[in-house]
């Protein structure tokens, strides 16, 4: 009987060992470094237009060789200027902005090939990802060398009774991130990934531009002189003549993007002990 028990214990330990050799779930912790950029009313279509540095922290959990849960916090900024556009109408509009972006996101990654850090049989894979994020932004404009926050100024008439349908926009919004990348590892502990991800947001005010020009007299009376000055910076005939004319495209939403390199350290799973000694 004692011999039979010993055989059962050895079999259980051996079975668990085989299972662990197949795949052990593991986590990764690391750093992201890259660039961020924006697309919207001031940059309708150019990828990687006026990129700015971005960085953050990344956590990844790998329940299998094909899937991974990814959580990150990224800090970056985006910007655009009509003056750098090839569209004459945009150049005459002469708007510009810069905004810090702080993003917290959760993503699901799918690896096209089996991938496991430290396994020489799974050295690299392309992958795709998608998920959900919350982000904070705060568009500012450069006026006489000083960066002025635009949201409190209501540059399109927000806060006035004349434009009662235009509500002040929130500086916290959501987006759907999605993109592509490549993963690879060197040695047994460090993993690397290069990815590019777009963010489809739910706001049209990442750049503080969305609809038509408001009456500058209304802006001055409601939100002050800066609101009137920054609401219309046209190179030709700025002011009351533009009231009601198109300032932005309210039928679309703004986008932003992060692209760069992530370096992670593999956190080894806890090794299970033989059931006989637990």
Image: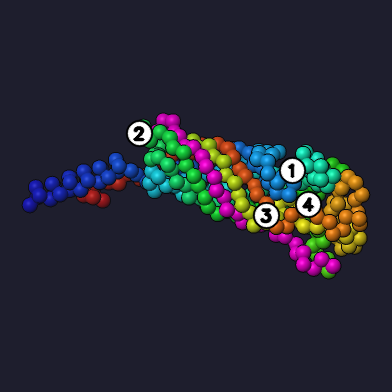
Q: Is residue 27 visible?
A: no
* Mark closer to the observer (2, 3): 3
Pinpoint residue 70: horizontal percent, then vertical percent: 49, 48
Image point (43%, 43%), residue name: 111
2 or 3: tag closer to the N-terminus:
2
Q: State the separation of the CA atoms marked 2 and 1.
A: 45 Å
Q: Is residue 126 visible?
A: yes
User: Disc 1 designates what residue?
Assistant: 80
User: Disc 2 designates what residue?
Assistant: 121
User: Disc 4 designates what residue?
Assistant: 149
In front of the other: 184 or 32: 184
Q: Mark 3: few, some, or many residues within 10 Å (few <14, many ≥20)?
A: some
User: Disc 3 designates what residue?
Assistant: 253
Q: Mark 4: few, some, or many residues within 10 Å (few <14, many ≥20)?
A: some
- Find numbered disc 3 in the image and state the secondary structure of the residue it sits on: loop
Q: Find residue 151 and report its image quarter.
A: bottom right
Q: State the separation of the CA atoms marked 2 and 4.
A: 52 Å
């Amino acid at each position: 009987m004692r011999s039979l028990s010993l055989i059962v214990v050895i079999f259980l330990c051996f079975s668990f060992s085989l299972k662990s050799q197949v795949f052990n779930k593991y986590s990764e912790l690391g750093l992201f470094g890259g660039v961020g950029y924006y697309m919207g009313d001031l940059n309708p279509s150019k990828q990687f237009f006026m990129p700015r540095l971005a960085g953050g922290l990344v956590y990844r959990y790998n329940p299998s060789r094909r899937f991974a849960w990814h959580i990150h916090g990224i800090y970056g900024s985006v910007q655009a200027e009509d003056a750098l556009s090839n569209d004459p109408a945009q150049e005459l509009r002469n708007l510009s902005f810069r905004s810090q972006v702080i993003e917290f996101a959760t993503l699901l990654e799918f690896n096209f090939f089996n991938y496991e850090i430290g396994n020489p049989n799974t050295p690299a894979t392309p992958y795709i990802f998608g998920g959900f994020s919350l982000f904070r932004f705060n568009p500012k404009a450069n006026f006489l060398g000083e960066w002025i926050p635009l949201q409190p100024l209501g540059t399109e008439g927000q806060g006035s009774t004349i434009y009662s349908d235009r509500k002040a926009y929130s500086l916290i919004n959501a987006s759907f991130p999605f993109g592509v990348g490549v993963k690879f590892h060197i040695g047994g502990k460090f993993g690397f990934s290069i990815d590019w991800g777009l963010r489809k947001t739910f706001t049209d005010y990442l750049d503080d531009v969305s609809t038509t020009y408001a009456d500058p007299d209304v802006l001055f009376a409601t939100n002050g002189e800066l609101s009137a000055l920054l609401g219309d910076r046209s190179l030709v005939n700025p002011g009351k003549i533009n009231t009601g004319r198109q300032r932005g495209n309210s039928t679309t939403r703004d986008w932003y993007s992060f692209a760069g390199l992530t370096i992670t350290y593999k956190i080894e799973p806890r090794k299970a002990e033989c059931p006989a000694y637990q």
